């Protein structure tokens, strides 16, 4: 197991280097003048030239690349082109905000979606199954920004039940923070309910049809005993893998929801940086999201290995 | 004419006297007189005496500057008529600052609004939101030709950051930093060493040339001219060194989420009614509007007609619609291509249905433009130039004369507010005269970088731009930037490549003139030339929109993202 983890971590470093390189290339080869983008169209050219000189964005691209990579190795992500402050503290604050939102969304989705998937699988082709499948397909096919907008208009503006902004007041206690995050988290949870419920359902149906499940039933185990001892651990393996991927996505990809609810998580932070050519923030943000993805998938692999011993993690093959 | 009037005439400087005479002889309307007299430093008492003596003039042709939702009173009048209660917090929705909160280097509305809570200007904004009034300066006086301006500073003002007194050294230090940074308003007007402290309470500005509008350049209309402490070195930001002389003290600042302020108990203006203010940052206007509808903000520093339609119908919302010089320029290349012939440019301008554009895009909250950037709100605007109106037959005739019947051109613009809709409307209006416009809407980066004013070639500037496009211009207290940068030969934003010695001469005349008659005469020439030669089409000047819940009163705003809350209070 230790060997597997070491190997995965090593591969992760290579992946992160590739990721940083790709982000650097995309951010630098696009035909845009960093100084002009930051100072705006009305700034005099002398000011733009001076800013490019100060930021070093007029140096040869290879030199900039080497500097950026050297900084990443020493965990020095540099200073933001926009604020002039080190990028890491602001990004970590954004990560924390995203973690709260993603955590609440997953907390709302996972138990309900798994229970719904299991229930549907056990009542395959019956009315309940059809209803859950239909609900899952519908909920996952409506984009988050549509669900979010409907929630804002109905729950926030018309009924005034929940705040329409997701950012709680400074020093808010946990219940208040949850209250502010409930609407955006619900908008996200509705979409992921469909994915997770359908994945759980199909995994469970596969396991229910397997020989070992039939054997367990024939040797006299009750349905709940069979589910608990033989079905759940195997049926949830694909679900765990899906959740791991969704965690990474929830951290970095929910720009639309963050915009609707004016929440400055990683999505808005990265978009802001991209629009203003803030390359240090953009590169560091991509690395952080990459790390979250890798940790999530590594954790899911370990959980899957624990759930199913047949998966030989430390095999040399 | 009474004794009081004579006393005013005797005590004024030659420039001030020129304005008084112009008003007395009916060459300035009452509104124009107040505006010009304030800029030239006449006291309100003297202005009142002159108006009383002259019995006012014919009613101003300009519309009221501040208006509110239909049927509602203005924000300023609401302040006078609605009972208020002390205490409380106001939550304000504002654009997220696009860069560091550096009062000297800032360039965006989010920063302007954030810094203007703490720092103050020599000349502040009056509560009607239209003109300048006393700020950190209590009096300003020009010499005979407007080359030297003397500012008397307010006494008893303290910096809340360290409790030190505000002095002339702070003004001189700020001006030196502004000049060194190449401040767009002061460039070419004030040089290094141009501001000198005569004593602790007086600053003398010696300008590079005569300028009758100088107080505007050290006012709220030049947002970077906020006065900062003498030792506030370039690059210092408000959050790193919180201080100011204003009504509010910065308590917390987070570039991602917002800022909070508390009352400055030592403010020279007295105790504010509200205890605290909270600025919440937004990237786009849509969520600002929903935040107001969801009762999570009380005021919006800016919104546009398209995103904020619901606010106009909200009876609990005060719309502060400030008439401003905000406009769009439809540039046409004058040096080459299909629009090089002025008849073609005139033809396109004749297809504009300006009232329809104003109604369709702004629900009427804009003023009609006449293809030049002299805004009707400027005191030297000449309304006698005939207004161009839609005339499709004449447009067709001009195109036929130029042998360009069936003209086809690409119309480039950026994805910004109403501009894509304007392009679509122009396309349909031009089609009536047989002109085919292919609308090309791009991201702002692509538009500015590739079509409006690409960095290469640098000489002449903007010479790689397309032959036809729409570009946005913000509010300016004087039209110098529009004329100098966008229309003067080799101007840095002259995307139409307009080069007219006649225009350049008229512009020089305008810049160097300080008397009312001379400025008006120069403006008449500028308006006439531009209206005839049409290097740019300019169909409207639109209002700057801000607003607040009627649960608050006494709020006023500039057209530059600054909302002033020192007089704000909750209504009883």
Image: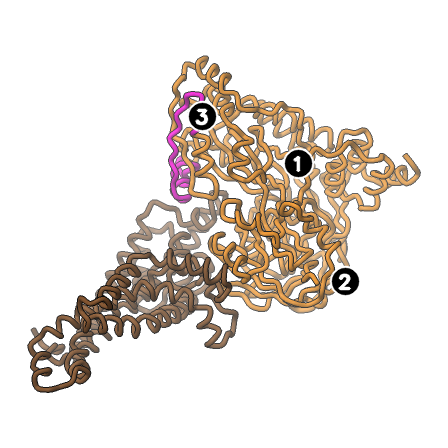
Crowding around mark 2 (Cα neighbors within 10 Å: few <14, some 14 to 19, many 20+) is: few
- Disc sitting over residue B378 in the figure: 1
Q: Nearer the viewer, residue A103 or A235?
A: A235
- Disc sitting over residue B156 in the figure: 2
In the image, which lettered chain appears brown?
A: A
Residue plotted at (26% across, 60% down): A137
Residue plotted at (40% across, 40% down): B447
Decide: is B444 above or below A224.
above
- Disc sitting over residue B430 in the figure: 3
Where disc 2 sits, the SS reads: loop
Chain ID, mark 3: B
From the viewer's perspective, is B113 left or right of A108?
right
Marks 2 and 1, the one that precedes in the sequence: 2
Q: Of all residues shown, which one is farthest toward the top? A: B401
Residue plotted at (20% across, 74% down): A236
Marks 3 and 1, the one that precedes in the sequence: 1
* Residue B214 image position (x, y, % from top left): 68, 42
For marks 2 and 1, give the one nearer the viewer. Answer: 1
Residue A270 showing in the rendered view: no
Chain ID, mark 2: B
- Disc sitting over residue B448 in the figure: none
* Residue A182 image position (x, y, % from top left): 42, 68
Marks 2 and 3, the one that precedes in the sequence: 2
In the image, which lettered chain appears orange?
A: B
User: What is the CA distance from the residue labelled 3 to the residue labelled 1?
Assistant: 30 Å
Residue contact between numbered discs 2 and 1, judged by CB atoms under 8 Å: no
Residue contact between numbered discs 3 and 1, judged by CB atoms under 8 Å: no
Residue plotted at (39% across, 27% down): B409
């Amino acid at each position: 197991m230790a060997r597997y983890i070491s190997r995965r971590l090593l591969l992760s470093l290579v992946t992160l280097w590739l990721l940083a390189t790709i982000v650097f290339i995309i951010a630098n080869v696009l035909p845009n003048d960093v100084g002009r983008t930051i100072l705006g169209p009305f700034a005099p050219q002398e000011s733009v030239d001076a800013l490019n000189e100060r930021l070093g964005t007029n140096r040869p691209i290879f030199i900039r690349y080497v500097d950026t990579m050297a900084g990443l190795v020493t965990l020095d992500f540099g200073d933001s082109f926009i604020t002039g402050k080190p990028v890491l503290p602001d990004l970590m604050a954004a990560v924390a905000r995203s973690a709260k939102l993603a955590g609440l969304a997953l907390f709302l989705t996972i138990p309900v979606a798994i229970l719904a998937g299991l229930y549907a699988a056990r009542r395959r082709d019956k009315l309940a199954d059809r209803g859950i499948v239909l609900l899952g397909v519908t909920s996952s096919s409506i984009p988050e920004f549509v669900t979010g907008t409907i929630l804002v208009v109905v729950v926030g503006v018309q009924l005034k039940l929940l705040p329409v902004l997701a950012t709680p007041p400074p020093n808010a206690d946990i219940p208040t923070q949850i209250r502010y995050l409930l609407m955006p988290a619900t908008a996200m949870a509705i979409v992921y309910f469909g994915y997770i419920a359908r994945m759980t359902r199909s995994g469970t149906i596969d396991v229910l049809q397997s020989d070992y499940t039939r054997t367990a039933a024939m040797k006299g185990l009750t349905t709940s005993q069979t589910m608990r001892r033989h079905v759940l651990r195997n049926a949830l393996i694909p679900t765990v893998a899906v959740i791991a991927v969704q965690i990474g996505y929830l951290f970095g990809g929910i720009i639309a929801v963050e915009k609707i609810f004016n929440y400055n998580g990683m999505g808005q932070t990265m978009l802001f940086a991209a629009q203003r050519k803030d390359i240090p923030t953009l590169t560091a943000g991509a690395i952080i999201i990459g790390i979250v993805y890798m940790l999530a998938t590594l954790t899911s692999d370990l959980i899957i290995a624990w759930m199913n011993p047949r998966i030989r993690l430390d095999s040399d093959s | 004419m009474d004794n009081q009037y004579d006393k005013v005439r005797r005590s004024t400087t030659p420039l001030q006297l020129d304005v008084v005479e112009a008003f007395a002889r009916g060459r300035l309307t009452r509104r124009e007189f107040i505006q010009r007299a304030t800029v030239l430093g006449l006291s309100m008492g003297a202005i009142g005496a002159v108006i009383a003596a002259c019995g006012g003039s014919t009613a101003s042709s300009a519309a009221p500057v501040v208006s509110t939702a239909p049927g509602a009173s203005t924000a300023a009048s609401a302040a006078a008529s609605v009972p208020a209660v002390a205490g409380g917090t106001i939550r304000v929705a504002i654009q997220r600052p696009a860069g560091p909160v550096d009062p000297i280097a800032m360039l965006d509305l989010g920063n302007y609004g954030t810094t203007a809570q703490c720092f103050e200007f020599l000349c502040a904004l009056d509560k009607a939101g239209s003109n300048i009034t006393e700020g950190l300066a209590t009096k300003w006086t020009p010499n005979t030709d407007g080359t030297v301006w003397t500012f008397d500073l307010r006494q008893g003002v303290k910096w809340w950051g360290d409790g030190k007194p505000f002095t002339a050294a702070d003004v001189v230090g700020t001006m030196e930093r502004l000049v060194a940074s190449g401040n767009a308003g002061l460039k070419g007007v004030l040089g290094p060493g141009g501001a000198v402290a005569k004593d602790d309470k007086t600053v003398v500005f010696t300008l590079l040339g005569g300028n009758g509008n100088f107080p505007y350049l050290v006012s709220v209309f030049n947002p970077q001219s906020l006065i900062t402490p003498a030792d506030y070195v370039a690059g210092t930001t408000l959050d790193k060194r919180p201080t100011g002389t204003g009504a509010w003290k910065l308590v917390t600042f987070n570039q991602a989420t917002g800022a909070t302020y508390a009352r400055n108990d030592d403010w020279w203006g007295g105790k504010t009614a509200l205890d605290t203010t909270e600025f919440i940052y937004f990237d786009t206007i849509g969520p600002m509007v929903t935040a107001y509808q969801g009762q999570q903000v009380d005021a919006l520093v800016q919104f546009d007609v398209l995103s904020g339609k619901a606010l106009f119908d909200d009876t609990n919302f005060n719309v502060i619609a400030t008439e401003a010089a905000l406009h769009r320029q439809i540039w046409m290349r004058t040096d080459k291509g299909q629009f090089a012939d002025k008849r073609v440019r005139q033809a396109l301008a004749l297809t504009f249905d300006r009232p329809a554009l104003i109604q369709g895009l702004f629900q009427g909250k804009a003023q009609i433009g006449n293809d030049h950037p002299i805004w009707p709100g400027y005191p030297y605007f000449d309304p006698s130039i005939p207004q161009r109106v839609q005339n499709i037959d004449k447009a067709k005739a001009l195109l036929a004369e130029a042998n360009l019947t069936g003209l086809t051109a690409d119309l480039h613009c950026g994805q910004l507010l109403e501009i894509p809709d304007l392009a679509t409307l122009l396309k349909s209006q031009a089609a009536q005269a047989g002109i085919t416009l292919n609308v090309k809407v791009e991201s702002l980066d692509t538009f500015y970088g590739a079509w409006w004013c690409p960095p290469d070639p640098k000489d002449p500037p903007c010479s790689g731009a397309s032959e036809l496009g729409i570009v946005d211009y913000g509010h300016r207290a004087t039209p110098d930037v529009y004329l100098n940068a966008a229309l003067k030969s080799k101007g840095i934003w002259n995307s139409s490549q307009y080069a007219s010695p006649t225009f350049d001469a008229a512009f020089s005349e305008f810049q160097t003139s300080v008397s009312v008659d001379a400025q008006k005469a120069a403006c008449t020439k500028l308006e006439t030339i531009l209206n005839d030669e049409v290097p740019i089409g300019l169909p409207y000047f639109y209002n700057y929109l801000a607003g607040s819940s009627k649960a608050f009163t006494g709020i006023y705003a500039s057209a530059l993202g600054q909302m002033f809350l020192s007089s704000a209070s909750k209504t009883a």
